Amino acid sequence: MSTIKSSVTISLVDEARGGPFVFWDDINTSCAEAKRLGFDAVELFAPGPDFISRDEVQASLDEYELEMAAVGTGAGMVIHGLSLSDHDEARREEACGFVRSMIDFGAAFNAPAIIGSMQGKAPSADEIDYTRDLLTESLESLGHYAAEYNIPLLFEPLNRYESNLSNTLSSAVAIIQDQSSKNIKILADLFHMNIEEKDMPHSIRDAANLIGHVHFADTNRRSIGMGHLDVQPIVDTLKEIKYEGYVSAEVFAWPNPLDAAVQTKYSYDIYFGLEDK
Ligand SMILES: [Mn+2]
């Protein structure tokens, strides 16, 4: 029985239109589609903790027997311009407050929050170390906050065009390995990794015990199978390290949401599903 589960993304953030999310409908319609296609879970990108009622989300999860794989926090950056490494202390605390509110939101569904774009970036090369220290400090406090729920916090290294603080899995390990909470896990996004890692299976093996979530995306950020990623060695490595978690389609809705979802599920079944279930 495979313990690697399938997930598909839903965005409710208008400001992120055109971004790498599969479904853009309301939560109930999206969950119905996810269930019909056979996904185990959904990953939700919402504008904030109060945009949609937790009861409404839970009702859709229950109706379609889906888990919540994770919740994004990027709206804090996209909508409010917040970052966990802001040099302004008051703004940085505001960013931490937003993430805490999203940790609360995710916890309602037993789902971890993701720190992606909310990590921010250094304004210049000279300030990278200082900015990364601020991020590390914010993560330290948020890791403890999430631990109160007994749910990890997910930290996602991004490619160089999105941040200069953590681009590789090993750089994420360096940030989180000394955290006192021991509650932060790494999100391995195959799209970012394709740009930054020297050897993707090797990087996954090196970070093995800290990987807590995978964004399942091809080289062009379309569904797996729609780019030129050499998928099999990555899948073999995830099985080899006994990864237990979601592979979640954070991909463009290309050519449309339904086809992107179908392609993702087809790839999931080939690589993880059919042989075990
Ligand atoms: Mn990602």
Image (cartoon, rainbow, N blue to C red):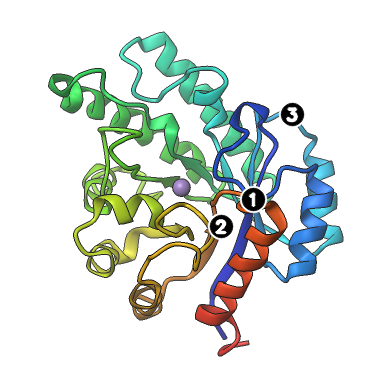
Which numbered dot is residue 42?
none
Q: Nearer the viewer, mark 3 or mark 1?
A: 1
Circle 2 packing at 10 Å, graded few (<14), some (14-19), many (20+), is: many
Callout 1 secondary element: loop
The extreme left residue here reads: 126
Cβ atoms at labels 2 and 3 below 8 Å apart: no
Q: Is mark 3 within 8 Å of ligand 1?
A: no
Which numbered dot is residue 249?
2
The quadrant where residue 139 appears: top left
Image height check: is 84 above or below 256?
above
Image height check: is 267 above or below 187?
below
Q: Position of residue 158 (x, y in %)?
A: 35, 42
Marks 2 and 3 sit apart, C-alpha to C-alpha, by 23 Å
Q: Is residue 256 left or right of residue 207?
A: right
Q: Position of residue 111 (x, y in %)?
A: 60, 51
Q: Give the residue number, with chain letter if any, for mark 1.
A: 22
Circle 1 packing at 10 Å, graded few (<14), some (14-19), many (20+), is: many
Which numbered dot is residue 51?
3
Mark found first going from the N terminus, 3 or 1: 1
Residue at 47% x, 21% y: name it.
Answer: 95
The extreme front residue here reads: 255
Cβ atoms at labels 2 and 1 below 8 Å apart: yes
Mark found first going from the N terminus, 2 or 3: 3
Q: Position of residue 182 (x, y in %)?
A: 35, 50
Residue at 78% x, 55% y: name it.
Answer: 31
Quadrant holding the N terminus = bottom right
Callout 2 secondary element: strand
**Front residue (pair 71, 223):** 223
Residue at 59% x, 37% y: name it.
Answer: 18
**Front residue (pair 267, 92):** 267
Q: Is residue 205 left or right of residue 72?
A: left
